[in-house]
């Protein structure tokens, strides 16, 4: 792993790319967890469905925080 942020290949600094990647992964995870919630609900496993709902909430929180941070940084 490189210590220096160069952006030579993509034109995007590593730290910026990392924030974009994190935000996208949180949103993707929230969508995937929706499927897991449906599967658990359909199977009658309310404990598992609730577990996935909590995880989905955390993913949505991470996505929202990432979007807010990106917005602030892109505005400058």
Image (cartoon, rainbow, N blue to C red):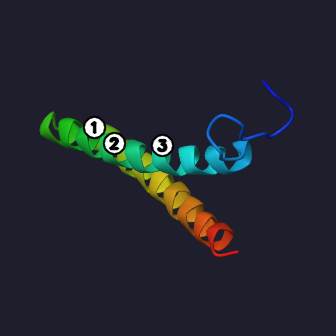
Residue 24 x, y percent position in the rendering: 47, 48
Residue 41 shown left or right of residue 70 in the figure: left
Measuring 65% from the left and 45% from the top, which residue is drawn there? 11
Measuring 32% from the left and 47% from the top, which residue is drawn there? 31
Tell which tag, 3 or 2, sits nearer the viewer.
3
Task: Tell me, for residue 33, which label it has, or none.
Answer: 2
Measuring 41% from the left and 42% from the top, which residue is drawn there? 29
- Inter-mark Cα distance, 3 to 2: 12 Å
Asked whether residue 31 is in view, the answer is yes
- Inter-mark Cα distance, 3 to 1: 16 Å
Q: Is residue 49 above or below residue 3?
A: below
Residue 28 shown left or right of residue 5 in the figure: left
Residue 42 x, y percent position in the rendering: 13, 38
Q: Is residue 35 above or below residue 64?
A: above
Q: Circle 3 is placed at which residue position? A: 25
Q: Circle 1 is placed at which residue position? A: 36
SS state under label 1: helix
Residue 75 shown left or right of residue 3 in the figure: left
**Closer to us: 61 or 55:** 61
């Amino acid at each position: 792993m490189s210590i220096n942020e160069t952006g030579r290949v993509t034109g995007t600094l590593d730290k910026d790319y990392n924030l974009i990647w994190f935000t996208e992964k949180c949103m993707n995870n929230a969508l995937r967890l929706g499927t897991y919630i449906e599967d658990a609900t359909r199977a009658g496993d309310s404990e598992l469905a609730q577990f996935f709902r909590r995880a989905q909430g955390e993913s949505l929180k991470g996505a929202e925080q990432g979007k807010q941070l990106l917005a602030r940084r892109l505005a400058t």
